[in-house]
Amino acid sequence: MSAPPADRNAEGNFLGAALRHPAFIAGLVLTLLFVGAALLSYLWTPYDPTRLDIAAKLQTPTSGHWFGTDHFGRDIFSMLMVGARVSIAVAIIAVGIGVSLGVPLGLYAAAHRGSLLDEVVMRGNDLIFAFPSLLLAILITAVFGPGAVNAIIAIGIFNIPVFARLSRGAALSLWTREFVLAARVAGKGRARISVEHILPNLMNLLIVQGTIQFSLAVLAEAALAYVGLGAQPPLPSWGRMLADAQTFISLAPHLALFPGLAIVLTVLGLNLLGDGLRDLHDPRLRRART
Amino acid sequence: MSVLSVRNLDLKIGRIPILEDVDLTLDAGHILGIVGESGSGKSMTALAIMQLLPRAARWTGTIEVAGNDVGAMSERALCTMRGRDVSMIFQEPMTALNPVHTIGDQVAEVVRIHGEAGRRHAHARAIEVLGRVGLPPDRVAPDRYPHELSGGQRQRVAIAMAIALRPKLLIADEPTTALDVTTQAQILDLLRKLVREDGMGMMFITHDLAVVAGLADEVAVMKKGRVVETGPTRQLFRQMRHPYTRALFTASAHVPERQPRIETAATPVLEVRDVVRDYPRPRKNLFQAQAPFRAVDHVSLTVRAGENVGLVGESGCGKSTLARAILALEAVQAGEIHLNGKAFSSAGAGPDIRQRAAAQVVFQDPYGSFNPRHRVRRLVSEPFFLMPESPQDADRERRIGKALEDVGLTAGDADKYIHEFSGGQRQRIAIARALIIEPSLIVLDEAVSALDVSIRAQILDLLAGLSDRLGLSYLFISHDLTVVRAITDRVLVMQAGRIVEDGSTEDIFHNPRHPYTRSLLAATPSLAAALDEPSGETVET
Amino acid sequence: MTNFKTVTATVSAVALILGLATMPSLAAQTDITVGMQLEPPNLDPTGGAAAAIDEVVYANVFEGLTRFTADGEVVPALAESWDISEDGLTYTFHLRDGVTFHDGSSFDAEDVKFSIDRARAEDSTNAQKALFADIQSVEAVDAQTVKITLSQPNGLFLFNMAWGDAVIVAPETADTLATDPVGTGPFAFATWTKGDSVALEKYAEYWGEAPRLDKVTFKFIPDPTAAFAAVMAGDVDAYPNFPAPENLEQFKADPRFTVIVGSTEGETILAMNNKKAPLDDIKIRQAISHAIDRQAIIDGALFGYGTPIGTHFAPHNPDYVDLTGQSAHDPEMARKLLDEAGVSDLTLSLKLPPPAYARRGGEIIAAQLKEVGITAEITNVEWAQWLEDVFKAKNFDLTIVSHTEPMDIGIYARDDYYFQYADADFKAILEELNKTTDPANRSELLGKAQRKIADDAVNAYLFQLPRTGVANAKIMGLWPNAPTQANDMTAVYWVD
Amino acid sequence: MTLYLLRRLLSLSLTLLAASIVVFLVTEIIPGDPAAFMMGINADPAAIAALRSELGLDQPVAFRYLNWIVGMLQGDFGQSYTYRVPVSELVGDRIAVSLPLTLYALALSTLIAFPAGVFAASRRNAPGDIAIMGVTQLGVAVPNFWFAMLLVLLFAITLQWFSAGGFPGWDAGVLVALKSLTLPAIALALPQASILARVMRSSLLDTLDEDFVRTARAKGLSRSQALWGHALRNALIPVLTIVGLQFSFLLAGGIIIENVFYLPGLGRLVFQAISQRDLIVVRSVIILLVFAVVAVTFLVDIAYAIADPRLRRQRR
């Protein structure tokens, strides 16, 4: 009675299972919808999202303006499309920073378990974790000034320890696996093993966590923009649209409704996608479903 | 009186058939052994009797426990039945107990939830039952937690829970598989004693023919969800009507043909001198460090060219640690290791990679030994890294193909991924990987322990053939004395970090000198011995 | 005593009749909660610049020799009357009798001398030290008389003494005013729940007419949405400086509330860095002025509240000259001027401090500038950063700010001021103005000054910041305008 | 155990020390002069200089850092630049709002998440489970400030059941004070409850797959007896971690919610202090929050040991 095989996921099987996973499909559709809107916004938007038309302000949704206009008469639908670009770009780069710094640090710390650097990396992570993140992000943007780039930095910093911890923890358990021992018997060094054997096996985990961090980054960007520290006008940003909409909440609720829904649906989509990926990569759950 | 009657049991999980037409009966006071290889459906049969099946499982047929039809019972009635009329012991004692409750509480719970006694009385009953299974309160207090107990002790606790209400039927699913042989013998004796005293029926599930031969009154042999043969133990094994039973029997006792050519004169392939491996232990308090744990204690051994050396011992004796030290995967605190006459150690930058090529390894777990993301070609050729000029292109392909063919696979398998292979095939690939750079020594760390007997026999044949043909030396590490006896020329017995006995295989098995060796041999279940003996009992150790 | 009884009886009778006639229910409410956007950092008007300090304590807790009335007039306060010498250098103030501080100590000429000397001292932390710059000496002639001698005539001196920074404090309590203000006003400080509210209570021994409220609570609600919700939910009774003009329509439509629209002293300008290229070129400054559509900004940022201005002067001031036509919205003209200046693809930084008029106005202006081919790169900054970066380091091209001090056209004469104008001719006009006390001459000089800065297109003059407040419809007596930053509660009362 | 605690204490102090340096340096390079801010736009330079020296801002950096650290060790957090009162007093006032709010939100979050998670886990993949998981998925995705806006719109403006915000103080009566914290606590608790319910469910599902639960079932325990008696306590360990993290997150993370509901809490104090360049308040509050995080982690570790006897004896 040996353990069930942990790695029986042929690619074709994966696709088939994915198509039978409704949450995954929903997540994928939502995510693609917003990524698509962001990409499309480079080519086309119904209106110029920076063009003001004060006379046409606060219009409720019509066939001309699908989501209505804001307090300056800008087209909300167009703003949301460009805003998706900002949200997605900030989130991608911030998570990218976390991955590209955190994963190597975690891999190194795991490969040199107990070394001074391991200790330094882990304590550094503890330190970053101990800081109230939103406050520190506000402080960082207070130092460098508000803007999309600094929002990226502020969010990125907090992604580093997430990925460092995750990859260190997972790598530590992979280091005890027999195929890693076999590679060591084959004379391979720690760095080489980390790249050839540890990293590829971390990928699933990183993709899942990456999706989740991505959704958190979208939320964080919205929060920073909401307090005025995200992308600067005239570039539209969902968080700032919400902040601007606030005083109109009883006058023109659609101003707050659409950006709020955009955030909720994007984050929801990413979370569903992440959960779906995790389910699909976890053979235990996959068997239970099929 | 029959305590268990299973008729025409068919079981499916989803659309996959698991059991087909299973018939079993068991009388009070009898032991029914269920034997089969992995996937034969023996555990699922047990779970069906307990009605603890996975959600997706659907079954038809009749299951009667102590005369009651479980198929007709409500979940509430089943709860009343479980633990009172029928109870079960599982394979893994390390995880079968709740880590956050004391053992006393866990035993008392059985008594309590069946309304047999109040809290205080239940506790008294728990102490009494724990005493029955060999855990009297003066030796193992009932307020201990599971993690404070050894594996054997935990399995005794599990047995105590199972028998607390003197059930009519006890199902034991591989209860000794995770235990060392000496512990296994004790647990088997305990179970046998309890069956006799309480007059209950026991269904004993195992993959080990020797265990079942020495224990059961009747045996059912299962294969792929069906009972292929059933009957009184001795009669069944003497007659062996079904070819599968015969094949199992042969495989269990299989000894490969060998013509070893040991070169005694040449430099030994491996020479280990006075090696010590310590692990630090956490400090007792701020000012007092604890003495380190000595996993390997001044061990010396030699392996000659062409020689197969066995290293046996129970879990925790230090044999795997020693293996890792020999492979220079871990530093040693004292002593020297020489490979083909040259020092081999992980100190400093580690051993010269060319020297590493001389010693390769095959691990136990056929599922964990390979990076699931690489193709077999890349997996098998990984040791080429150790060669100063690793073969390229056609030469490389040729050697990969040859290595695969050497272990009974085909060159075309190089393009597949590892998940496309069965456990036995994977172990062949592991051997191919070890062979590909023609090492002089292969360390086989429990290399056949996870395999079913029939596959195990094939791999042993393969190993024996390779050794003879290529003049390879093996350091064969195992807890299983039968296997070691089958394949080695010389045996080292290890206990608590020390080598306690060292001699030729035949010598040691026929004439053990050290008491530990003797106790190991005595505890090892033997199929032949069990079938020869007049009654189904072994001597208590 | 008899007399008192009679009065009381009469009052009661009248009240009874009135009550039967107009208010069948209970007596009018005597406490009020007033919403404010910013919390004062401390409560000492002589030791900090924050407008919020004056908004709480001016005229309520502290009083000066003179004071502003609701329409901006300067009237006697602690000084009952004054004499001015022929040469305009000596002011003799006759102080009011029977004035006491809230701690019970009496008020006299020594307190005045102390307060003014403290404000103009070397190590003074008075934010408006300039108000006292012309004072040569302060002399307590007797307990009720103070003589102040100036080094040069100053037509604005009585006006200056009405500022919150010039209130009279007692020497014994001067050091603790920041947290425990003690003044002579109709209300005494009661409690300060930091981050939430300041409460004042009626001062029974007040020298003047007793206020009709017993308790005033100022509640600090920085978030405009929260402010809206608080007013709607009745958490605050009045919000005299309501931060979200977009909500006023809703209040207007709701019979529970009255909307009070008044003016402030806040000239809101698009300030330009006059010494930094290319803004040192008047053509470009003019181009920017013409590019801007004031009405669109007022409509978009302030929802129609606010008066366009064409120079740095309050339109409600009798001396105001309407020069808006001089820099009318004319994108064609703007483009032409830019061509003449020989620039194209102009990119300018636009730094916006936190108030909504600046942030929203900035977005609109950026869009308007874009129409004439100027790219304005917006950076939103906090006040601290604005002060450091814009005001002190002058590291900016454009910024939007409202200059809320009354009569502050004098800033155009300051050397090293952030928009770096300090034109010699303008300085000469101002110098003459300071020496002039004759109203007609002053008026002419003021007109000249207004025209000068409009001609030079120093800044783009946008609008006079409105004061848009909302209050429970039953509250009377709130100031509609803001001649200074204050919430004078003296005359406020509830009707039923 | 004692040794383990000592080690943890040491690492705790090192983290705090490192954090104090980071915070001090960041606040040091932040542009904007506190004195200039306080004196405003028309201030006299001499007056600003006078204020700088009054606030001690003209002293060297190292001296000010040491002064701050030594002061803190003696329990003196210094004096707020803007408010001119001891920081400790200011912080004390704000904690009286933030801590109860945090605990309120945490209690709500736990009270919602716990039954929801257990319910979902006990009905794995059944409609009830799927519904709860769907709701939590949504709860995680909703930005709390947006949710807060909707709450205000509905309960304060439209229904007028609650006041739109503000905090009357504990003097106004415990019930009145709690009522004013209710909407903010709900806004804070919803996303946290969603996260917690998900963790609770998955942890419980993992535990329900454990061998010892099967053993319990074999003993005759019903599904729910096994869940409550055996799985739950084991499943609580990861849940505890999350609760600990949520405590620290809520304590500091309420800033935006405090703004929406204009509550005089810690987060808004720092936010305001940052914009007013009341740097000493910024530093002290952040260090305090870091301390809270570290201390809570420490407490969670102790709670682990209580929940899990395996950790009671020795731990590296």
Image (spheres, coloured by chain):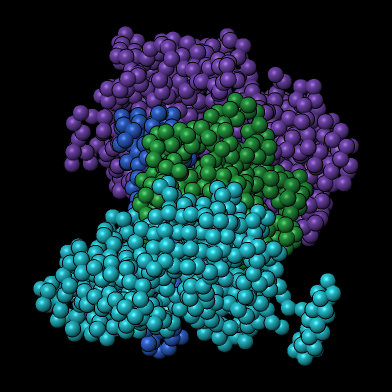
Chain colours: A blue, B purple, C cyan, D green
Q: Give x and y (percent) for residue C398.
A: 27, 67
Q: Nearer the viewer, residue C353 or B490?
A: C353
Q: Relative to residue B495, is residue D122 depicted above or below? A: below
Q: Give x and y (percent) for residue B245.
A: 58, 40
Q: Give x and y (percent) for residue A128.
A: 45, 43
A111 left or right, relative to D112:
left
Q: Residue at x 20, y 28 (%)?
A: B388
The residue most toward the bottom is C21
Q: Relative to residue C1, is residue D295 depicted above or below? A: above
Q: Nearer the viewer, residue C402 or C100?
A: C100
Question: Quadrant where the C terminus of chain D lies?
Answer: top right
Total number of numbered discs in the rendering: 0
Q: Residue at x 45, y 75 (%)?
A: C264
Is any atom of residue D6 visible in this view? yes
Image quarter of residue D148 = bottom right
Q: Residue at x 37, y 14 (%)?
A: B337
B455 left or right, relative to C289:
right
Q: Residue at x 40, y 47 (%)?
A: C122
Is any atom of residue D293 visible in this view? no
Q: Nearer the viewer, residue B386 or C35?
A: C35
Q: Nearer the viewer, residue D149 or C488?
A: C488
The residue most toward the front is C86
Image quarter of residue C363 = bottom left
Question: Quadrant where the N terminus of chain D lies?
Answer: top right
Q: Give x and y (percent) for residue C91.
A: 45, 63
